[in-house]
Image (cartoon, rainbow, N blue to C red):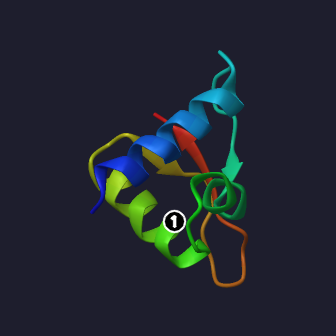
Amino acid sequence: MSNDACDKILSFMQSQANGRINIPVRTRSIADAAGLTIYQASAYLVTLEDAGVVEKMNAGKGVSGRWRLV
């Protein structure tokens, strides 16, 4: 996985949080900000989740993904 893409994702999520805690960010917003497809962003987010950096706040088929920094 690209460290550059992960850095872009984390930077965007930090900017969205703006010092607040538990601010959810949609997968689509993350993908757009990082210049990735939604599928690429999802793959990077799962990698970051496995590393304990982000957490998926909801799950389910057809549910828009929302992520937060841990």
Q: Is residue 1 above or below residue 15?
A: below
Q: Name which residue type carries label 1.
A: Ala
Image location (x, y in percent) of residue 62: 72, 83
Q: Would residue 59 be found to the left or right of residue 43 on screen?
A: right
Image location (x, y in percent) of residue 31: 62, 62
Q: Residue at x 41, y 41 (%)?
A: 7
Q: Residue at x 45, y 58 (%)?
A: 45
Q: Is residue 56 above or below residue 24?
A: below
Image location (x, y in percent) of residue 19: 65, 15
Q: Is residue 66 above or below residue 11?
A: below
Q: Residue at x 59, y 61 (%)?
A: 35
Q: Which residue is mark 1?
A: 41
- Direction top: furthest residue: 19
Q: Residue at x 63, y 60 (%)?
A: 58
Q: Would residue 64 be found to the left or right of residue 3 on screen?
A: right
Q: Quadrant of the N terminus?
A: bottom left
Of the pair 27 and 52, the residue shown nearer to us:
27
Q: Quadrant of the C terminus?
A: top left
